[in-house]
Image (cartoon, grey):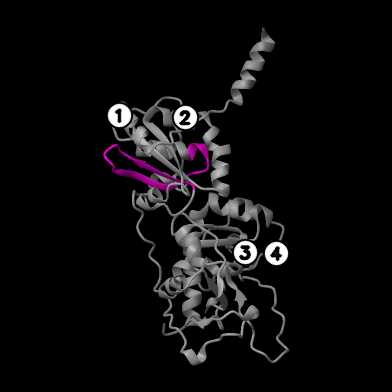
Amino acid sequence: MLLSAVIAATASSFATAEIAWNENLRSAHAKAQAENKLLLLHFYSDNCVWCDRLEAGAFKAPIVDAALTEHYIPVKIHAGKNPQLVEMFQVKAFPTDVIVTTNGKTVSHTVSPQAADRYVAMLQSAVPQGMAVPQGIQATASPTQNLAAETPAEAPKPNHAPAPQVTAAPASANLAGQFAGGAKGILAGARTDGMTLGMPAQMTEESLPEPSKEALAASASEPQSDSVTESPSPENTTGKPDQPGLAMEGFCAVTVIKEDRWVEGRPDFGVVHLGKLYLFASADAMETFLADPVTYTPVLNEIDVVRFFEERRIVPGKREWGLKDPTHNRMFFFADEAAMNHFWDEHHRYTDAAIKVMNKAVKDANPGT
C-alpha cells in the first residue's frame, strides 16, 4: 500500500498536460462565443527553436493547461499555412500569442513567454475583471520578469536615434567587381573608420545593464577592466584597400526582419554599410534597406551583446545563434547558444543599452549626419 502511494506521488510530480488545441478558427470562435471565453491565437512556424522549446516546456505544464481551460479557447496557427492571418494580426516573430475577444478586439499581442509561470501570468493579465482566476494556478512574477503582462496590445514603436543619412554613391563611384565573388556594392554614408565601442566612457553608468550574478560569479577571480577589449586586427601589408566583411553571412537583412526568413542575398544587390557588405534578395529589398538602414542592421554590428556587457569583450556573433528581440524587433547575434539563451531570458536588460551604444558609435564616426 505504501509502495503504491509512493509510485502515485512520484507519477503526479512528473505529470504533463496536453493542451486541447483547435485548428479551425471559425469553429473556435463559435465555441468561445458559446462558452463566453477569450480566444488565444498561438502562431508558430517550422524550424523555430523557440516554438519547439515551448512545446516541450511550458505547454506540458499543468498550470498552463489549467489557465487555458478556465478562460480560453486555444487555437494553434501555422504561419506558413495561414499567411493572411499572420498579416492580419501583424505577427513579426515566432512564437507569438495574440489574445482576442469574440468581438475581434485584441487584448494582448506578445512573443510567447518560455517559462510556464510567465505564460500563466500573460494569460491572467488578459482576463477581464470579473472573471475569476482558478485556484492553484496563481503565478507570481516580478515587474521585470512579467514582460508579457506589461506589453500593450499594440507596442509603441521604438524611439531610435535618427538614422545616419544614407546616400547612394554616383554611378562612377560604383564598386562593381571590387568585392570578393564579383559582388557589386553601393557605398552608404555611414562609415566605421574612427568608430569605437568603448565602454563605459561613452555611456553613463545608469544607461548600462548591471552584470548578472552569474557573470559576476564567473569573473570574480579574474582581473576587471572598464575598457572593452578586442583582438588586434592583422596589419594590411598588401597596399590594397581593405575589403569589407560580408554582413549576416550573405543573407538578406530585410527578409529576416520583415518576413522571418533567411534568404541568400544576390551579388548584384549590395550595399556597404558600417564597414560591411550587405547583400539583398532583390532590388526592392535593397531600396528598403537604404531608406531605413537602422531597422535592418544587427545591433552592435553583429557583436555578441552578452559578451560585450557582461565580460567587456568584443566577440563576433554567428548567424546560427541570431534572433530578433521582442521589444524593438532588431537582430542580435551571439557567439554561442548559451549567450543567446541568456539574452532571451533577460533581453530587457540589454536591448536599450546596446542600441544606445550602437547609435552613439555610429554618430561619433559620422559627425554632421
Crowd band around label 4 with a 10 angstrom C-alpha radius: few (<14), some (14–19), many (20+): few
- The tag earlier along the polypeptide, 1 or 3, is 1
Q: CA distance from mark 3 to mark 2?
A: 39 Å
> Which tag is nearer the camera, tag 1 or tag 3?
1
- Residue position marked by numbered label 4 in the rendering: 223
Please say if the residues under marks 2 and 4 sit with CB atoms less than 8 Å apart. Answer: no
User: Where's residue 174, x and y in %?
Assistant: 52, 87
Three-letter amino acid code of the residue under disc 1: Asn
Magenta extent: 95-118
Sequence-wise first label, 4 or 1 = 1
Alpha carbon distance from label 2 to label 4: 54 Å
Q: Is residue 113 left or right of residue 234?
A: left
Q: Determine the secondary structure under disc 3.
A: loop
Q: Amino acid at mark 2?
A: Ala
Q: Is residue 272 above or below residue 97?
A: below
Mark toward the start of the polypeptide (2 vs 4): 2
Q: Which residue is mark 3?
A: 317
Q: Which residue is mark 1?
A: 36
Magenta stretch contains residue 293: no
Up-down: is 78 above or below 90? above
Q: Amino acid at mark 4?
A: Pro
**Which label sits on residue 135?**
none
User: In the rendered image, which residue does mark 2 sit on?
Assistant: 20
Q: CA distance from mark 3 to mark 4?
A: 24 Å
- The mark that comes first in sequence, 1 or 2, is 2
Q: Is residue 115 magenta?
A: yes
Q: Quadrant of residue 245?
A: bottom right
Q: Quadrant of the N terminus?
A: top right
Q: Could you say where residue 91 lies in the image, as x and y percent from the top left?
A: 41, 52
Q: Name the residue at 37% across, 33% down.
A: 28
Q: Residue at x 57, y 66 (%)?
A: 264
Question: Around disc 2, counting alpha carbons within 10 Å, would you say few (fewer than 14), some (14 to 19), or many (20 or more)?
Answer: few
